[in-house]
Amino acid sequence: MILILDFGSQYTQLIARRVREAKVYCEIHPYNIASDRVRQMQPEGIILSGGPASVYADGAPLPDPRILDMPVPILGICYGMNVLFQLSDGVVTRADRREFGSAQLIIDDASDLFAGFSVDSETRVWMSHGDKMEALPRGWRVLAHSVNSPIAAGRDGSGRFYGLQFHPEVVHSERGSEVLRNFLFRVCRCDPNWTMEGFIERETQSIRERVGEQQVVCGLSGGVESAVVALLLHRAIGKQLTCVFVDNGLLRKDEAEQVVRVFSGLGLNLRHVNAAAQFLDQLAGVEDPEKKRRIIGHTFIEVFDEAAKTLSDVQFLAQGTLYPDVIESVSFKGPSATIKSHHNVGGLPERMRLKLIEPLRELFKDEARVLGKLLGLPDEIISRQPFPGPGLAIRIIGPVDATGLTILRGADAIVDEEIRAAGLYEKVWQTFAVLLPVKTVGVMGDERTYENVIAIRGVESVDGMTADWARLPYDLLGRMSTRIVNEVRGVNRVVYDISSKPPATIEWE
């Protein structure tokens, strides 16, 4: 196991994902975790993440210094490297010129972290710092440098401490994964034994032992996480599992029917609750996006609770909580900013008095997809583009009503059909339609119209943390626009969103 200490970097989760991709298990914990707890975990290595602070500032976050005495390799990334330097009596100062973005890294020592590289060769890396290492600690040596960072990578004389000024975990660092793998396998001597096949066997046995002969209820949305949880529980306990599908009326065209068809066909015990009218009543007149999210979450709990009460002898609730949900929703996971709340982390069990089963809470989304494939989840579910929990409610800017949903569903279905017909559905991260709170003048059949505007959003991304707008072919955009205006009653104009994340977000709300 590799332990990652979080100092508040926006990339901390990416470090964990890269380690998992190398088939090595890892966990993220706060930077100030007690050294006794670390010893109990018995990690093969420790990674110190980046962070927004400067180590020489008052109150800068620092780890329990006894952790550095543990006989395991430690890799510091960006701020983490500064921590190692500072605690080893090196000198860290504010740089004359900050370095954000792409930089050329020049290799000075092609061993250890840079095994497989060539001395004096260059590789593109991603920098994000305003400090620099002014002087090496005693016994350290430089492994690589850049124009602005004379000490861009280094190690101590014992071969136990390593530091990188750049971020190897981001995709912009061309050979960053190689550097991390060298740390895992050459330095820490880890074994690549974290596999989804092994996870299935361990979790299946664990679920059987915990549940025994009792009943479990699972909220099934049709998304990847809840689908994988349902199939894993079905594999472990069969008919002791009842899945409740709450149709909130905010799904895409024909999506509710698809969920019922697919999961009934897989042999799951499924109950379909059509609560569309209840959700729409609660959302009537609501404009604020966060209020929409809260209403949808609370209404879901109420509907699910009522459905679960009709089941006999249910003792457990299964949820599709993923590791990022846990990290983002629980403040003790470190100083990283809470990005959003997740109603599936904590809310339901307290309300329903059920014991909680969260078999995916150690996994990232890409790992859950691999798990789903191994469990026999159809590609039509596994390969679906990301879809927000609040559904179409946050793709209608402003109040949600039946008319707006009908317009948006029609436009979104056309975007989906055309992107699939062009062979781009699995190549583009996300494509969807948004209904804007704007009406414009148009001309149809020699008559003036004053109707709605649809925005098409298409983005390229690897993990959703950053995204660039997709350069969709003009003729494809033209077909989408023509079809939407001709086939969706109430729309006379289509626009294309060319904003990247940041500064925009992928979803409009």
Image (tube, helix red, strand yellow):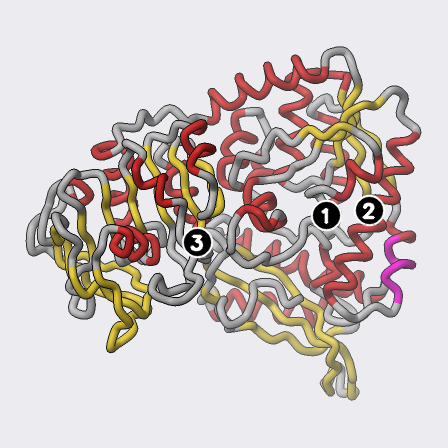
Tell me the kind of residue under disc 1: His
User: Residue 70, located in which quarter of the rendered image?
Assistant: top left
Q: Which mark is residue 303?
A: none
Q: Is residue 282 magenta?
A: yes
* Residue under label 3: 7
Which kind of residue does numbered mark 3 sit on? Phe
Contact between marks 2 and 1 (CB within 8 A): the answer is yes
The local secondary structure at tag 1 comes to: loop
Q: Residue furthest left?
A: 119
- The boundaries of the magenta stretch are 279-284
Q: Amino acid at mark 2?
A: Phe
Which sits in the foreground, 386 or 37?
A: 37
Q: CA distance from mark 3 to mark 2?
A: 35 Å
> Is 424 positioned to the left or the right of 401 in the image?
left
Q: Front-most of 204 and 397?
A: 204
In the rendered image, is residue 22 in sight? yes
- The residue positioned 19% from the left and 70% from the top of the image is 148
- Which of marks 2 and 3 precedes in the sequence? 3
Q: Position of residue 232 (x, y in %)?
A: 63, 24
- Mark 2 vs mark 1: in front: 1
Tag 1 or tag 2, which sits nearer the N-term? 2
- Report the residue marked by disc 2: 300
Mark before the other along the chain sequence, 3 or 1: 3
How many other residues sit within 10 Å of disc 1, few (<14), some (14-19) or many (≥20)? some
Quick one: 494 or 278, which is closer to the camera?
278
Q: Quadrant of the C terminus?
A: bottom right
Q: Residue 292 occupies which quadrant of the picture?
A: bottom right
Name the residue tied to disc 1.
Answer: 343
What quarter of the picture does the N terminus occupy?
top left
Select label 3 or label 2 by which is in front: 3
User: Could one spot residue 422 in this view of the protein?
Assistant: no
